Structures are given as C-alpha cells and as structure tokens.
Amino acid sequence: MTFFEYIGRTAIRLVEEIGSLAIFCYDFLFWLIRPPFFFSQLFKQMEFIGVRSVTVVLLTGVFTGMVGALQTHYGFSLFGAESLVGSTTALGLLRELGPVLASLMVTARAGSAMTAEIGTMRVTEQIDALTVMGVNPFQYLVNPRIIAAIIMMPMLTLVFDGIGIVGSYLVGVKFLDIDSGVFMARIVEYVDYEDLFTGLIKATFFGVILSVVGCYKGFTTTGGAEGVGKATTSSVVISSVSILVADYFLTAVMY
C-alpha cells in the first residue's frame, strides 16, 4: 500500500464512521418519543450508571479537592494570598474538575460496560433475536442507557463537587491552618450559582458523549470476543478524548 492509498483509505474509513454515527444518533432520536417506553430498563440503567458510580466519584472527588487545596496553597503562599485557597479550589471543582473528572470516571466504569454488554449481545446475535421477537433494540437497549446517563451525570457531578469542597476544607483548615471562617467566606464571596450551572451543563453534554459512544461502539461490534475487547478499548479512548475536546469548546462558549 502506497502512502496516498493509506491516506485515502483512512479518510474513507473516517467518513464512513462519521456517517454511521450520524445514522445511529438519528435512529436514537427517531425512537426516543415513540412507544413502548421501557421504564424498568431506564431505572435499571440509572441505578447502574449513577448509584453504582457514587463510590468511585466520592473517592476521586475528595482527593481531587485535597490536592487542589495543597497546590493552590503553595502558589498563593508565595504572595500572601492563602485566604483564596477555598474559593479557587471551589471554582476549579465547579467549573472544570467536577464535570470532567466525574465523566471520565463514569466513562471508565459504565461507558466501557455499555460497550461490552451491547457488543456481546451483538456478536452472540441476541440483538437479532430481540428484533425477531418484535422488540426494537434502540428502545430496549440504547435509549434507556443514553437517557440514564444524561440524567445521572449532573447528579454525580454535584456529589463530586460537594465532597471535593469538603476535602479541600479539611486540608486547608485542619492541616494548612487557614481560618475556617475566612475559608468559607471567600467561597461565598467569589463562587456564584452560574459557576455551578456551568459545570452541570457540561456534565449533561459529557453524559451524552460517553453514552452515545459507548452504545454505538457496542452496537457496531464485529469479530467475536476479540472484537468486543477492541470495541470496549476504542469506546473508552474516544469518549475520554471527546470529553476533553468538548470541555474546551464548552468553556470557550460559556465564559
């Protein structure tokens, strides 16, 4: 294969992949408002994506807040502004770190599971069996997962933000000797509801990204068990990179 053949085939594969994803998204929207609605599947996926992700979100959030307090204290101590540690850490959590890191954790835990589960059903012809039985696979498998991710990601982000601020408070007040009243007063003074809503909007978009990519990669899996593994790896990588890219553009639009 020559260099130009490689470039051409890569471009063709990219266009085909984008077109296939666009058709997948159209089918999701087409079947979204049409009955039947599998609410039991929706609640099951909300529990899987949301409730079962709380532990990893709590652990990630508390240590992110603690590290944020340590790092900002070191920087602000160079020019005597230690009182701003709380507000700076809170702003970072609410606007950026909360939605991004929570989404990456959910991508690694739930997004990969979506791809593996649906991909296994695809290669073992269980999705074809659903179609034969008259059950639309989008309504039964795809829609509940995407809707559940959209609903649960802002809630998980709130959990991440809250525990992160608690972690930064513990480090700032208990270990770095920042006055607790000053610590909280600066947060109240500089942090606004707009900062919170910005992070929640981002989390909603990130929920769409990780769920759509996870379901799409699973739905288009081929090649047996090896194909499931490749699709799962590809899903996590694409979702993570897409979340970081989307974070930049969302930040640029909302600032």
Image: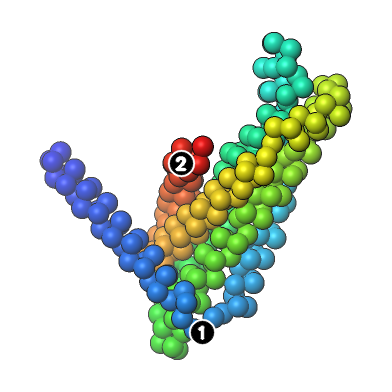
Q: How is the image coloured?
A: rainbow
Q: Position of residue 77 (x, y in %)?
A: 72, 14
Q: Is residue 128 above or below residue 171?
A: below
Mark 1 crowd level (few <14, some 14–19, many ≥20, 10 Å Cα): few
Q: Residue at x 44, y 88 (%)?
A: 134
For this orientation, the residue located farthest to the top is 79
Q: Secondary structure at mark 2?
A: helix
Image point 51% across, 37% down: which residue? 255
Residue drawn at (46%, 84%) of the image: 135
* Location of residue 171 (image quadrant): top right
**Residue 164 shown left or right of residue 120 in the figure:** right
Q: Closer to the N terminus: mark 2 or mark 1?
A: 1
Number of the label disc, if any, that sits on residue 253: 2
Residue in the picture at 48% in, 70% down: 142
The residue pinned by badge 1 equals 36
Q: Are marks 2 and 1 in contact (CB under 8 Å)?
A: no
Q: Determine the CA span between mark 2 and mark 1.
A: 37 Å
- Residue 89: name its quadrant: top right
- Of residue 102 and residue 92, the one placed in the foreground of this image is 92
**Neighbours of disc 2 within 10 Å: few (<14), some (14-19), many (20+):** few
Q: Amino acid at mark 1?
A: Pro
> Which of these two is toward me, 198 or 104?
198
Residue 172 place in picture, x, y as percent: 80, 27
Quadrant (top left/top right/bottom left/bottom right) for the N terminus: top left
Whether residue 159 can be seen here: yes
User: Is residue 98 at least partly visible in the picture?
Assistant: no
Q: Nearer the viewer, residue 204 or 127?
A: 204
* Residue type marked 2: Val
